[in-house]
């Protein structure tokens, strides 16, 4: 994956903890902003507030951040109560003869 300065990424933090109860804990943190590209696939990150994260991170511990507000996704009503089935053009009518 190619990252560029300004991209938003999630950072994978650490191995599975040995303590019980934390096995299913989320270990992806972010979003963070890529601030600098370095040799050997190392990237410097900062928080969205502009605070650096400290040590640079290898790209193997990053993945692109996808916003939960995806453009172009149309939410349909969960029930058909908004339309009258008798007048809706999508509902086929049956005649009883």
Image (cartoon, helix red, strand yellow):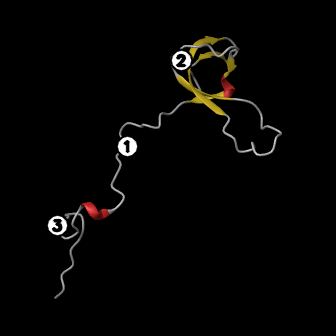
Q: Position of residue 16 (x, y in %)?
A: 77, 38
Mark 3 neighbour class, 10 Å CA radius: few under 14, some 14 to 19, many 20 or more: few
Foreground tag (2 vs 3): 3
Q: Secondary structure at mark 3?
A: loop
Q: Secondary structure at mark 2?
A: loop
Q: Which residue is at the front of the view, 73 or 69?
A: 69
Question: What residue is rendered at 50% in x and 33% in y?
Answer: 66
Q: Position of residue 44 (x, y in %)?
A: 63, 14
Q: Vertically, is 21 above or below 89?
A: above
Q: Going from the N terminus, do you reach mark 1 or mark 2 first?
A: 2
Q: Which residue is mark 1?
A: 73
Q: Which residue is at the front of the view, 69 or 64?
A: 69
Q: Going from the N terminus, do you reach mark 2 or mark 3 first?
A: 2
How far apart are labels 1 and 2 at the CA level?
A: 26 Å
Asked which quadrant contains residue 50, the reply is top right
Asked which quadrant contains residue 91, the reply is bottom left
Q: Which residue is at the front of the view, 1 or 43?
A: 43
Foreground tag (1 vs 2): 1
Say which mark, if any, is on residue 4.
Answer: 2
Question: What residue is rendered at 80% in x and 45% in y?
Answer: 20
Q: Which residue is mark 3?
A: 87
Asked which quadrant contains residue 35, the reply is top right
Q: Secondary structure at mark 1?
A: loop
Q: Vertically, is 95 above or below 31?
A: below
Tell me the quadrant of the picture where the N terminus can be found.
Answer: top right
How far apart are labels 2 and 3 at the CA level?
A: 52 Å
Q: Which residue is at the front of the view, 23 or 2?
A: 23
Mark 1 neighbour class, 10 Å CA radius: few under 14, some 14 to 19, many 20 or more: few
Mark 2 neighbour class, 10 Å CA radius: few under 14, some 14 to 19, many 20 or more: few
Q: Going from the N terminus, do you reach mark 1 or mark 3 first?
A: 1
């Amino acid at each position: 994956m190619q990252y560029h300065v300004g991209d938003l990424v999630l950072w994978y933090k650490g191995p599975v903890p040995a303590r019980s109860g934390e096995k299913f804990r989320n270990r992806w943190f972010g979003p963070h902003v890529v601030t600098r590209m370095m040799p050997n696939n190392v990237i410097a990150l900062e928080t969205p507030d502009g605070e650096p994260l400290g040590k640079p991170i290898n790209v193997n511990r990053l993945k692109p951040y996808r916003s939960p507000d995806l453009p172009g996704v149309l939410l349909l009503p969960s029930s058909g109560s908004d339309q009258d089935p008798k007048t809706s053009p999508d509902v086929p009518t049956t005649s009883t003869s």
